Image (cartoon, coloured by chain):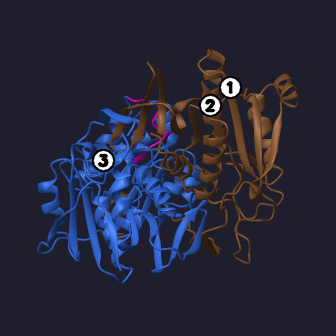
Amino acid sequence: MKVLVAVKRVVDYSVRVRVRADGSGVETANVKMSMNPFDEIAVEEAVRWRESGQAEELTVLSAGPDACQETLRTALAMGADRGIHLRVPDPGGALEPLALAKLLAQQVAREPVDIVLLGKQAIDDDANQTGQMLAGLLGWPQGTFCSAIRFVGEGLEVVREVDGGLEHLALELPAVLTTDLRLNEPRYVKLPNIMKAKKKPIEVREAAELGVDIAPRVQIIQVAEPARRTAGVVLNDATELVARLREEAKVI
Amino acid sequence: MAVLVIAEHDGEQLAAATRSAVAAAQLLGSEVDLLVAGHRVETLAAAAACIAGLRGVLSCDAPQLEHALAECHAPLVASLAGEYSHVFTAATTTGKNLLPRVAALLDRAQVSDLMAVVDAQTFVRPVYAGNALETVRVEETPVVASVRPTAFGAVGDDDPVAIRVVQLPDAPPAGSRFLKLEASPGERPELTTAGVVVSGGRGVGSAENFALIDQLADALGAAVGASRAAVDAGYVPNDYQVGQTGKVVAPSLYVAVGISGAIQHLAGMKDSKVIVAINKDPDAPIFQVADYGLVGDLFQIVPQLIAALEK
C-alpha cells in the first residue's frame, strides 16, 4: 500500500498572531513556523502504518516557498520515506485549497497511491477544504475528521468526529482521509532521526510548470483585528453574580 | 439569479443551523431556494417550506441520500448549482464535509465560515482561529460559501412555499457506506444554538466531577460544553469541545468553569454576549475576556451558584 501525506508550513500554534498595520495580512516575518498540527497527526498515523507493515511507501508533499523543505525534513525525520516539494515562489501569496487539491490530484495521477492523508484544516487559513476537494476531483470516497482509522479486509473503517457524536463509515480504496485531533499523539523527533532524514530524497518541482491552474480565485481585500473584549469585574460571591446576571446583564 | 441553500437534517428534523444559513443568504438581496435531500423526506420538505422568506423548496428523495455522505450529495448539488448565483450551507461538520466536494465538482473556490456579508460578492471570514478577520471578494459564479451559524440569526416560520421535486443525477458508486452513529447522550439544548452554555475545563478534575457542571447547566437551562483539555482528559465526549478545532458558540451567556482560557478555547466562545469565568487562578487568561469573574474553588462556588439561582 502506498500513502501520500500533504503537509503545510504554518505559523506555530503557540504564536500570538499580529495583523499588519496596513491590513495586508498577518505578520509572518521572524515568526516561528511549524508543521500544521493536523498534518503532523497525519504524518504520525501514516508512519505507524509504515512501521506495522500496512504501508510500503510513505511520501510527503508540501507546496509553497523554499522553507517548506524544513517541514518536509521534519516529516522525513518522523519516518516518511521521501519528500516532494512543489515550489511556489515567495512572495506569491499562499496557494488556495482548490489549487493545492489540483496539484495533489496531478501528483496522484503521476504516481498512484492507495490513500491520501491530510490534516482536516490548516491553522492559518482555517479553510477545511483541501481533502474534500481532492476527493471530489479524483472521484474517491472521503473520510474526513477521522479519530480512528482501521484496515478491514480490502478497505477501511473510519470513525469521524461529527456534531452529533461519532460516525462510523466503511470506505473502499483508494480514498482520501483527513485527521482530527484525537487520532493519535505525534511523536517527538529524535536527533539521530533528524540526521538520517537529511539523507532522504526530496524531489523539487516548480508548481507553475505542472500545467495546473493555481492562480488565486479569491481576492483578499483586507485583514483586520477582531474587536477586542475587555476584562470585566471580579465579584465577591455567587449571590452577587446571580444579581448582576439578572439585573445588569439581563441574560437569565 | 437566486441563491441555493443546502438544508441539513438528521432524517427527522431540520438542523437549527440551516435557518442561520438561510438568514445569511437573505442578506444577498436575491431570492432563496432551500434544497432538502435525503430518503423519505416528504415531512422534512414540508417543514422546510414553512421557513420564512424562501422562494421555494427543492426536494430530492433517494435511498442513497439517507445519510449525509458527500459522495452522494455533492453530485446532486453540483447538478443544480448552474441555476444559482450562490450555493450556501451551514459550516457544521456535515456542511464542512460536503461543500468543498461540491466546489471541486464545479471548479470553484470556497469561502469557509462566512461571518458577515458585505455585498453579494464580498464577505468577512475568520482566519487564525478568529485572531484575524479577512474580507474577501469572489467574482466567480456561483459563489460557494459555508456560513458560521452563530454569526447570523435564525429565520422563523411563515406560510408554506411550493415544493419542487428534483431528480438525483447519475453518479459513480460512492465507495463509502454508513455503518452507524454513536450519538452523544443528552436531552439538553444543542451546543451551537443554545442561549446559555456552561463549559468545564481541566479544573473540574474528573468525569465524575463533571456532574457538577451538568447540575449548573440544568439550573440555567443551558447546554454543556468543555475545553479541549477536559475532552483530552476523557471527562466528556469529543463533541462537547468548544474551540478553534471544536465547536464555535455565541450564546447570550457563557459560563466557563475551571477553564484557564487558552487561545484555542477563546476562539470558540469569545463572541458570546456575556462571559462568566469561575477559576481559582486570578491570573488565568479567561478573566481577560470575562465580563464577570469569581475567583476561588469551583467545588465551593458552583454549588453556591446553583443555590443562588434556585432562590
Please give the range of residues in magenta: B199-207
SS class, disc 3: helix
Q: Chain of mark 2?
A: A
Residue A33 among magenta residues: no
The reply to the same-chain question for discs 1 and 2 is yes
Q: Which residue is most to the top?
A: A52
Q: Kindly report the distance in space between the C-alpha atoms of the residues bearing marks 3 and 2.
A: 45 Å
**Whole-percent x, y for residue B120 in the image:** 45, 80
Q: Which residue is mark 3?
A: B217
Q: Which chain does tag 1 point to?
A: A
> Three-letter amino acid code at disc 2?
Val
Q: CA distance from mark 1 to mark 2?
A: 6 Å
Give the CA separation, mark 3 to mark 1. Answer: 50 Å
Residue B94 in the image, given as x and y percentages of width and height = 37, 50
Q: Position of residue B95 (x, y in %)?
A: 39, 54
Q: Earlier in the sequence, mark 1 or mark 2?
A: 2
Judging by the rendered image, the residue that carries numbered circle 1 is A57
> Of helix, strand and loop, which one carries label 2?
strand
Residue type at numbered disc 3: Ala
Q: Which element is circle 1 on?
A: strand
Q: Mark 2 and mark 1 in contact (Cβ < 8 Å)?
A: yes
